[in-house]
Amino acid sequence: GESVGLHLPTLSVQEGDNSIINCAYSNSASDYFIWYKQESGKGPQFIIDIRSNMDKRQGQRVTVLLNKTVKHLSLQIAATQPGDSAVYFCAENRNAGGTSYGKLTFGQGTILTVHP
Amino acid sequence: EPEVTQTPSHQVTQMGQEVILRCVPISNHLYFYWYRQILGQKVEFLVSFYNNEISEKSEIFDDQFSVERPDGSNFTLKIRSTKLEDSAMYFCASSEASGLRKLFFGSGTQLSVL
């Protein structure tokens, strides 16, 4: 069945370090992946996305890597800041036709704590 | 920056009562969604809505749930007879035609059924 899961439920880093958050997915038909950040009391906030025809995509201080061979997704945050402390979710989508585009399957989340 | 807004932020209700959760999606978005997150669990898809009709719904979205876009700006989720297990954070989301799968979420409504 479809599932998206995270290897590490918590991650603590020092300010300025690089952070890597991992995600495993099991549905080989997934062709779109998103990382969301959720701060306390707020909804998921879009960080970066990647399509399955890519293996790397960079944004501002963030990079997403996709390894389709082992069904693994990672989010790298450079020079992590205290404001990056949040829960990070990966989500996947399988293009099954026009009605399925907004049906995201979320992972369980990783708590990132950045210490000053 | 445009955002999805949800009201109320917290809703407490008695079991068996009807609740309506309200959302104002981003104005130029055409696709609307409801998700929920039970405490300690994953965010789960409930329903997608486009062109004034449901596009897709999950097995969670049974006959007790309904959605409506009563006017040009609001998008609502109604639970007709709430159960204890409906207690969760409910998130509304929207997306635009040029980026269907890039969902923007609201801050959620925390529903507590007593």
Image (cartoon, grey):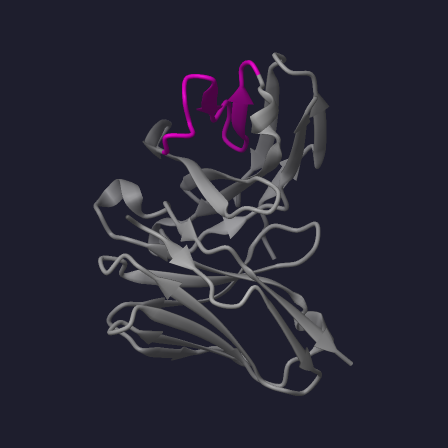
Q: Looking at the image, is A77 positioned above or below residue B69?
A: below
Q: Nearer the viewer, residue B2 or B79?
A: B79
| Range covered by the magenta-colored residues | B58-81
Q: Picture quarter containing residue B112? A: top right
Q: Residue at x 30, y 68 (%)?
A: A71
Q: Is residue B71 rendered magenta in the image?
A: yes
Q: Is residue B88 above or below residue A60?
A: above
Identify the residue shown where x is 50% and y is 46%. B43
Q: Residue furthest right?
A: A116
The picture places residue A89, in percent across and down from the top left corner, at 51, 60
Nearer to me, B85 or A83: B85
Image-based side of B12 in relation to A73, left or right: right
Q: In terms of secondary structure, what is the magenta stretch mainly?
A: loop
User: Is residue B68 or residue A104 the one in the foreground?
Assistant: A104
- Is residue B28 visible in the rendered image? The answer is no
Q: Residue at x 28, y 40 (%)?
A: A99
Q: Quadrant of residue B91?
A: top right
Task: Tell me: residue B100, above or below residue A47.
Answer: above
Q: Quadrant of the C terminus of chain A?
A: bottom right
Q: Position of residue A95 (x, y in %)?
A: 24, 52
